[in-house]
């Protein structure tokens, strides 16, 4: 009886969702699309329970270059609910959750085909309909310098990371786009040039010393706001990098200067990936 009542409630909810969508279609078709996206997310979250796993566990799988599974470890099977026989040979999207953005996997495959590693928060679906979040790192597998497949290593994410990912994916699925003006240097340079020209023009027609001082202070404050990242945020970050990870080896691997210091964590990360791959191959002969 409880199952029937629950199904009945779900059918009512879906029907109301479509009725509301029809109403939106008379008002604004874009609103309809966004509402149904949010509705589909809500519907999928009503089914299944979150499965968690220990921070010490690693869910490992490998695929060929087309995405067909060639290896899974026991932790992966335990969390996903599939046996090894059920997974080997299947395409990796067998565990893909409908809440996941297609753009996420498009980005992943672009990075992998360029020979780079990829990391992201992925919501996977278990065999019984439950789901689990995984902090996922995917790395190309090389043999004689040629990519022969990909290895995925999944770690347990923190609650904060899961909440962030869930919020971001829901917003993107509903059609919201994100912009980062602080990284748009063309816009920043144009705004800065316009402010300088405007202030110089203003100063040229004013002989009052106080007015000129105010104009200069306003210009400096505006430039500080536009270049807040460079003036206020980056210096402490660079100082912390220099304190925690800098070493003479940085001069060999990434050279001199501030940019080399910012690149050095990527060098260390690449070395860490190679170490992880070598360790996993030694621990799991089936990966070789």
Image: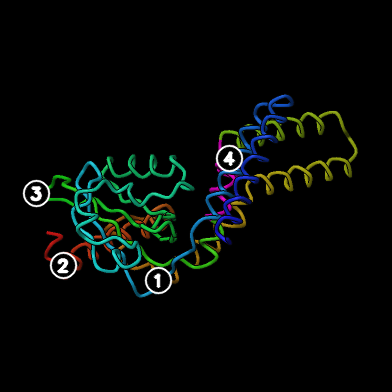
Above or below for 176 versus 72:
above
Distance from the alpha carbon under mark 4 to that under mark 1: 29 Å
Q: In terms of sequence position, does the residue under pointer 4 or pointer 1 come before the other?
A: 4
Distance from the alpha carbon under mark 1 to that under mark 2: 21 Å
Q: Which residue is mark 4?
A: 37
Q: Residues within 10 Å of mark 1 (few under 14, many from 20)?
A: some
Residue 148 appears left or right of 214: left
Q: In terms of sequence position, does the residue under pointer 1 or pointer 2 come before the other?
A: 1
Comparing labels 3 and 2, the label whose residue is closer to the camera: 2
Q: Residue at x 62, y 36 (%)?
A: 34
Q: Which residue is mark 1?
A: 53
Q: Residue at x 51, y 55 (%)?
A: 47
- For label 1, the SS is loop
Q: Please report contact status of discs 2 and 4: CB closer than 8 Å, yes or no.
A: no
Instruction: Describe the colour scheme in one phrase.
Output: rainbow
Above or below for 225 versus 61:
above
Magenta includes 5? no
Distance from the alpha carbon under mark 3 to that under mark 1: 35 Å
- For label 3, the SS is loop
Q: Which residue is mark 3?
A: 144
Q: Quadrant of residue 119?
A: bottom left
Distance from the alpha carbon under mark 4 to that under mark 3: 45 Å
Q: Which residues are magenta?
A: 165-185
Q: In terms of sequence position, does the residue under pointer 3 or pointer 1 come before the other?
A: 1
Q: Which mark is residue 284?
A: 2
Above or below for 251 versus 181:
below
Q: Please report contact status of discs 4 and 3: CB closer than 8 Å, yes or no.
A: no
């Amino acid at each position: 009886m409880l199952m029937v009542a629950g199904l009945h409630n779900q059918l009512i909810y879906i029907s109301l969702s479509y009725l509301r969508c029809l109403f939106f279609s008379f008002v604004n078709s874009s609103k309809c699309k966004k509402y149904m996206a949010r509705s589909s997310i809500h519907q999928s979250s009503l089914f299944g329970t979150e499965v968690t796993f220990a921070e010490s566990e690693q869910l490992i799988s490998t695929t060929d270059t087309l995405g067909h599974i060639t290896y899974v470890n026991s932790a992966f099977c335990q969390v996903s609910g599939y046996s090894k026989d059920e997974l080997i040979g299947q395409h990796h999207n067998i565990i893909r959750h409908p809440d996941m953005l297609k753009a996420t996997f498009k980005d992943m495959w672009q990075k992998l085909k360029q020979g780079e590693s990829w990391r992201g928060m992925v919501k996977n679906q278990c065999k019984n309909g439950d789901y689990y979040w995984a902090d996922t790192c995917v790395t190309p597998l090389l043999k004689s310098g040629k990519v022969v497949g990909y290895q995925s290593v999944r770690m347990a994410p923190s609650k904060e990371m899961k909440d962030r990912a869930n919020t971001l994916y829901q917003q993107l699925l509903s059609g919201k786009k994100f912009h980062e003006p602080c990284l748009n240097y063309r816009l920043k340079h144009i705004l800065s040039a316009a402010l300088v020209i405007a202030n110089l023009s203003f100063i040229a027609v004013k002989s009052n010393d106080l007015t000129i001082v105010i104009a200069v202070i306003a210009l400096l404050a505006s430039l500080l706001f536009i270049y807040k990242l460079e003036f206020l945020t980056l210096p402490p970050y660079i100082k912390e990098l220099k304190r925690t990870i800098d070493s003479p080896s940085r001069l060999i691997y990434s050279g001199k200067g501030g940019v080399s210091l910012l690149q050095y964590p990527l060098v260390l990360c690449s070395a860490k990936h190679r170490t992880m791959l070598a360790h996993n191959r030694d621990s799991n002969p089936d990966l070789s």
